[in-house]
Image (cartoon, helix red, strand yellow):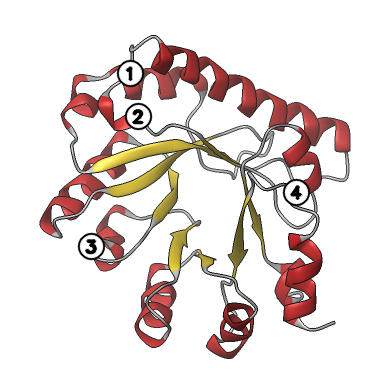
Amino acid sequence: MSIQSNLNAIKTTLPEHVTLVAVSKTKPVSDLMEAYEAGQRIFGENKIQEMTDKYEEMPKDIQWHMIGHVQTNKVKFMAPFVNLIHGVDSLKLLQEINKQALKNNRIIDCLLQIHIAEEETKFGLDENELNELISSSEFEKMKNIRILGLMGMATFTENQNQIKKEFTHLKSIFDSIQQRKDAQQCASTMNNFSTISMGMSGDYQLAIECGSTMVRIGSSIFGGR
């Protein structure tokens, strides 16, 4: 099947409230342009240099999402154009994004990454670290970031019950922050808190059942790496 038909097949399965991020890392611009011509406007990359190169070469109505782990010293390269940073997992990284956003006269949208998997290798905050971060005075001071929601990655396993448990856990953390926000107990940077980014090619339908509003799909659109 072509990229266009893969994309159309996936889009027909997505509820209206779910945003599709086409994960285009390692794929050539020609593949991305095929998806673009089929109407896709949101692309996810995991390396800042590759994303910057593609940004320069491709149409400017594309929204670029950084979905990989972000090194603080690389933030400046994507700060002029990135639309959403999914993997924010420390106050230090958030402060750097805020600083670079200010330099570019922008407000940069971010998701806080929560560690929900059993694997040690996955990045992310635990629930206590998340609460500490959003309650800190440093967080209150940041005016050039907007926290749109949370992101999480499930354990790489065939066990659907485990994946479901992890997705449900992320949704419950999201709901507890939503309640704090509704009770005006959160900084103004969290006024737009409404996104849960979870689910990839193998588990996105389960993720949507568990409350995901944004899915990151690569191989089901572009084929294997």
Give the crowd class for mark 4: few <14, some 14-19, many >=20 residues within 10 Å.
Answer: some
Q: Amino acid at mark 4?
A: Tyr
Quadrant assignment, res 55: bottom left
Asked if the residues shown at circle 4 and circle 1 are in contact, with their CB atoms under 8 angstroms apart, the answer is no
The kind of secondary structure element at disc 3 is helix
User: In the picture provided, is 203 more to the left or to the right than 41?
Assistant: right
Q: In 3D space, how far apart are the residues under numbered discs 4 and 1 (Cα atoms)? A: 29 Å
User: In the picture provided, is 218 more to the left or to the right than 97?
Assistant: right
Q: In 3D space, how far apart are the residues under numbered discs 3 and 2 (Cα atoms)? A: 23 Å
Going 76% across and 76% down the picture, which residue do you hit?
Answer: 223
Q: Nearer the viewer, mark 3 or mark 2?
A: 2
Q: In 3D space, how far apart are the residues under numbered discs 4 and 3 (Cα atoms)? A: 31 Å
In terms of sequence position, does the residue under pointer 4 or pointer 3 come before the other? 3
Residue 164 position (above or below residue 81)? above
Q: Nearer the viewer, mark 1 or mark 3?
A: 1
Residue under label 4, please give it: 204
Give the crowd class for mark 3: few <14, some 14-19, many >=20 residues within 10 Å.
Answer: some
Return the residue nearer the eye: 133 or 121. Answer: 133
Q: Amino acid at mark 1?
A: Cys
Residue under label 1, please give it: 186
The kind of secondary structure element at disc 4 is helix
Q: Which mark is residue 190?
A: 2
Residue under label 3, please give it: 76
User: In the picture provided, is 8 more to the left or to the right than 108?
Assistant: right
Asked if the residues shown at circle 4 and circle 3 are in contact, with their CB atoms under 8 angstroms apart, the answer is no
Quadrant assignment, res 160: top right
